[in-house]
Image (spheres, rainbow, N blue to C red):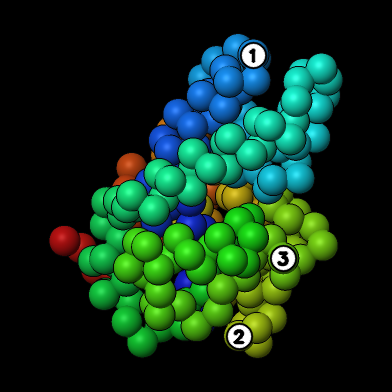
Protein backbone atom coordinates (compact mmCIF):
# COMPACT_ATOMS: atom_id res chain seq x y z
CA UNK A 1 0.00 0.00 0.00
CA UNK A 2 2.83 2.41 0.87
CA UNK A 3 6.14 2.55 -0.97
CA UNK A 4 8.00 4.44 1.77
CA UNK A 5 7.58 5.53 5.38
CA UNK A 6 8.70 8.93 6.65
CA UNK A 7 9.14 9.86 10.30
CA UNK A 8 9.58 13.20 12.02
CA UNK A 9 12.07 13.12 14.88
CA UNK A 10 11.42 15.51 17.78
CA UNK A 11 8.13 14.85 19.52
CA UNK A 12 7.33 11.94 17.19
CA UNK A 13 10.09 9.41 17.85
CA UNK A 14 11.91 11.01 20.78
CA UNK A 15 10.77 13.08 23.74
CA UNK A 16 12.72 16.31 23.24
CA UNK A 17 9.88 18.82 23.43
CA UNK A 18 9.78 18.79 27.24
CA UNK A 19 13.55 19.38 27.32
CA UNK A 20 13.23 22.29 24.89
CA UNK A 21 10.41 23.80 26.94
CA UNK A 22 12.15 23.75 30.32
CA UNK A 23 15.59 24.79 29.07
CA UNK A 24 14.08 27.53 26.87
CA UNK A 25 12.15 29.11 29.73
CA UNK A 26 15.33 29.02 31.85
CA UNK A 27 17.39 30.67 29.09
CA UNK A 28 14.87 33.48 28.68
CA UNK A 29 14.77 34.01 32.44
CA UNK A 30 18.57 34.26 32.58
CA UNK A 31 18.32 37.04 29.98
CA UNK A 32 15.73 38.88 32.07
CA UNK A 33 12.79 37.92 29.87
CA UNK A 34 9.70 36.19 31.22
CA UNK A 35 7.91 33.83 28.86
CA UNK A 36 5.12 31.38 29.53
CA UNK A 37 4.44 27.89 28.26
CA UNK A 38 2.01 29.19 25.62
CA UNK A 39 4.73 31.27 23.98
CA UNK A 40 7.12 28.33 24.04
CA UNK A 41 4.47 26.02 22.60
CA UNK A 42 4.21 28.37 19.62
CA UNK A 43 7.80 27.52 18.73
CA UNK A 44 7.23 23.78 18.53
CA UNK A 45 8.06 22.32 15.15
CA UNK A 46 9.84 25.42 13.88
CA UNK A 47 13.41 25.53 12.60
CA UNK A 48 16.00 27.63 14.47
CA UNK A 49 15.92 30.52 12.01
CA UNK A 50 12.15 30.88 12.38
CA UNK A 51 12.44 30.70 16.18
CA UNK A 52 15.05 33.48 16.15
CA UNK A 53 12.82 35.65 13.97
CA UNK A 54 9.88 35.26 16.36
CA UNK A 55 12.05 36.11 19.38
CA UNK A 56 13.41 39.25 17.68
CA UNK A 57 9.90 40.36 16.80
CA UNK A 58 8.39 39.69 20.23
CA UNK A 59 11.35 40.80 22.38
CA UNK A 60 13.43 43.26 20.31
CA UNK A 61 15.46 44.39 23.33
CA UNK A 62 16.40 40.88 24.44
CA UNK A 63 19.93 39.56 24.08
CA UNK A 64 19.17 36.97 21.41
CA UNK A 65 22.74 35.65 21.32
CA UNK A 66 22.71 34.99 25.07
CA UNK A 67 19.31 33.29 24.90
CA UNK A 68 20.40 31.06 22.03
CA UNK A 69 23.69 30.24 23.75
CA UNK A 70 22.14 29.34 27.11
CA UNK A 71 19.19 27.54 25.54
CA UNK A 72 21.49 25.55 23.28
CA UNK A 73 23.78 24.57 26.15
CA UNK A 74 20.89 23.54 28.35
CA UNK A 75 19.19 21.60 25.58
CA UNK A 76 22.40 19.80 24.62
CA UNK A 77 22.95 18.80 28.23
CA UNK A 78 19.41 17.44 28.39
CA UNK A 79 19.86 15.48 25.18
CA UNK A 80 23.17 14.03 26.31
CA UNK A 81 21.55 12.87 29.55
CA UNK A 82 19.39 10.53 27.47
CA UNK A 83 16.41 10.70 25.15
CA UNK A 84 13.32 8.64 25.97
CA UNK A 85 11.55 7.14 22.99
CA UNK A 86 7.90 7.92 22.43
CA UNK A 87 5.49 5.03 23.04
CA UNK A 88 5.46 2.42 20.30
CA UNK A 89 8.62 3.52 18.49
CA UNK A 90 10.58 0.28 18.68
CA UNK A 91 7.59 -2.01 18.03
CA UNK A 92 6.71 0.05 14.96
CA UNK A 93 10.27 0.07 13.64
CA UNK A 94 10.50 -3.67 14.21
CA UNK A 95 7.15 -4.28 12.50
CA UNK A 96 8.29 -2.30 9.46
CA UNK A 97 11.78 -3.81 9.20
CA UNK A 98 12.74 -4.11 5.54
CA UNK A 99 10.47 -1.27 4.45
CA UNK A 100 11.96 1.88 2.96
CA UNK A 101 12.16 4.47 5.72
CA UNK A 102 13.42 8.05 5.97
CA UNK A 103 13.74 10.51 8.81
CA UNK A 104 12.52 14.00 7.91
CA UNK A 105 13.39 16.67 10.49
CA UNK A 106 13.76 20.43 10.87
CA UNK A 107 16.85 19.84 12.99
CA UNK A 108 20.25 20.62 11.45
CA UNK A 109 22.19 17.62 10.15
CA UNK A 110 24.72 17.29 12.96
CA UNK A 111 22.08 17.65 15.67
CA UNK A 112 19.76 15.15 14.03
CA UNK A 113 22.41 12.46 13.76
CA UNK A 114 23.52 13.11 17.34
CA UNK A 115 19.97 12.70 18.65
CA UNK A 116 19.56 9.48 16.67
CA UNK A 117 22.75 8.11 18.20
CA UNK A 118 21.81 9.09 21.75
CA UNK A 119 18.33 7.58 21.34
CA UNK A 120 19.67 4.36 19.83
CA UNK A 121 17.93 4.94 16.50
CA UNK A 122 20.93 5.35 14.21
CA UNK A 123 20.81 2.83 11.38
CA UNK A 124 17.02 2.47 11.25
CA UNK A 125 16.63 4.84 8.29
CA UNK A 126 17.76 4.65 4.69
CA UNK A 127 17.85 8.44 4.40
CA UNK A 128 17.93 11.34 6.83
CA UNK A 129 16.53 14.63 5.49
CA UNK A 130 17.44 17.62 7.66
CA UNK A 131 17.11 21.40 7.74
CA UNK A 132 20.42 21.62 5.89
CA UNK A 133 19.08 19.70 2.91
CA UNK A 134 16.29 22.08 1.85
CA UNK A 135 15.88 25.79 1.19
CA UNK A 136 12.30 25.83 2.48
CA UNK A 137 11.76 23.95 5.76
CA UNK A 138 8.48 22.71 7.20
CA UNK A 139 5.62 23.73 6.84
CA UNK A 140 6.75 23.92 3.21
CA UNK A 141 6.43 20.53 1.49
CA UNK A 142 10.06 20.53 0.31
CA UNK A 143 11.46 18.16 2.99
CA UNK A 144 8.90 15.46 2.22
CA UNK A 145 9.15 15.97 -1.52
CA UNK A 146 12.91 15.48 -1.22
CA UNK A 147 12.45 12.30 0.82
CA UNK A 148 10.09 10.89 -1.80
CA UNK A 149 12.52 11.82 -4.56
CA UNK A 150 15.38 10.05 -2.80
CA UNK A 151 13.40 6.82 -3.05
CA UNK A 152 11.98 7.58 -6.49
CA UNK A 153 8.49 7.38 -4.98
CA UNK A 154 5.25 9.14 -5.68
CA UNK A 155 4.53 11.19 -2.51
CA UNK A 156 0.94 9.92 -2.68
CA UNK A 157 2.29 6.44 -1.91
CA UNK A 158 4.26 7.59 1.15
CA UNK A 159 3.07 7.46 4.76
CA UNK A 160 4.24 10.14 7.21
CA UNK A 161 4.28 10.13 11.01
CA UNK A 162 4.27 13.62 12.56
CA UNK A 163 3.39 15.24 15.87
CA UNK A 164 3.12 18.98 15.16
CA UNK A 165 0.75 21.05 13.04
CA UNK A 166 3.71 22.46 11.13
CA UNK A 167 5.07 19.04 10.27
CA UNK A 168 1.69 17.59 9.39
CA UNK A 169 1.00 20.55 7.10
CA UNK A 170 4.31 19.98 5.29
CA UNK A 171 3.49 16.32 4.69
CA UNK A 172 -0.07 17.08 3.62
CA UNK A 173 1.08 19.73 1.16
CA UNK A 174 3.59 17.25 -0.27
CA UNK A 175 0.69 14.91 -1.05
CA UNK A 176 1.58 12.22 1.47
CA UNK A 177 -0.77 10.30 3.74
CA UNK A 178 -0.37 11.81 7.21
CA UNK A 179 -0.60 10.13 10.60
CA UNK A 180 -0.48 12.78 13.31
CA UNK A 181 0.26 11.83 16.90
CA UNK A 182 0.12 15.08 18.91
CA UNK A 183 2.81 15.48 21.56
CA UNK A 184 2.59 18.46 23.94
CA UNK A 185 -0.07 20.39 22.05
CA UNK A 186 -3.49 18.93 21.27
CA UNK A 187 -4.65 18.93 17.65
CA UNK A 188 -7.90 18.75 15.72
CA UNK A 189 -6.01 17.01 12.91
CA UNK A 190 -6.56 19.67 10.26
CA UNK A 191 -3.63 18.33 8.23
CA UNK A 192 -3.97 14.68 9.17
CA UNK A 193 -5.62 11.76 7.43
CA UNK A 194 -5.32 9.80 10.68
CA UNK A 195 -5.24 11.48 14.11
CA UNK A 196 -4.07 9.03 16.76
CA UNK A 197 -3.05 8.91 20.43
CA UNK A 198 0.11 6.90 19.70
CA UNK A 199 2.22 5.62 16.83
CA UNK A 200 0.93 2.05 16.79
CA UNK A 201 -2.70 3.13 16.80
CA UNK A 202 -1.94 5.51 13.96
CA UNK A 203 -0.12 2.81 11.99
CA UNK A 204 -3.10 0.47 12.37
CA UNK A 205 -5.53 3.21 11.37
CA UNK A 206 -3.54 3.78 8.18
CA UNK A 207 -3.48 0.06 7.43
CA UNK A 208 0.29 -0.18 7.78
CA UNK A 209 0.20 -2.93 10.41
CA UNK A 210 -2.44 -5.39 11.53
CA UNK A 211 -4.55 -5.27 14.69
CA UNK A 212 -2.94 -5.78 18.08
Residue contact between numbered discs 3 and 2, judged by CB atoms under 8 Å: no
Q: Is residue 93 among what the camera can see?
A: yes
Cα gap from disc 2 to disc 1, whole angstroms = 48 Å
Instruction: Tell which residue pokes out farthest to the left in this image.
Output: 212
Residue 196 position within the rendered picture, expressed as x and y whole percent measured from the top left: 37, 45
Q: Is the residue 55 above or below the residue 196 in the image? A: above
Indicate the secondary structure of the residue bearing disc 2.
helix
Which residue is labeled 1 in the image?
A: 32
Q: Is the residue 172 above or below the residue 117 in the image? A: above
**How many marks on residues?**
3
Label 3 Cα crowd, 10 Å radius (few <14 / some 14-19 / many 20+): some
Which residue is labeled 2 in the image?
A: 151
Which residue is labeled 3 in the image?
A: 132
Question: Nearer the observer, disc 1 or disc 3?
Answer: 1
Cα gap from disc 3 to disc 2, whole angstroms = 19 Å
Question: Nearer the observer, disc 3 or disc 2?
Answer: 3
First-in-chain label (2 vs 1): 1
* 145 lies left or right of 85: right
Residue 125 position within the rendered picture, expressed as x and y whole percent measured from the top left: 46, 77
* Residue at point 57%, 17% (across, down): 29
Amino acid sequence: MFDALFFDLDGTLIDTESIALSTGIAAFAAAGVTVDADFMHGLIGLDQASVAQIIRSRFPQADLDAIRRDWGAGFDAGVNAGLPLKPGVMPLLQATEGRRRALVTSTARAGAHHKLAVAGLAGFFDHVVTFDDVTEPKPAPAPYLLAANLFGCDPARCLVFEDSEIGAEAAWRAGCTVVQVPDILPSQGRWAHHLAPDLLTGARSAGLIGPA
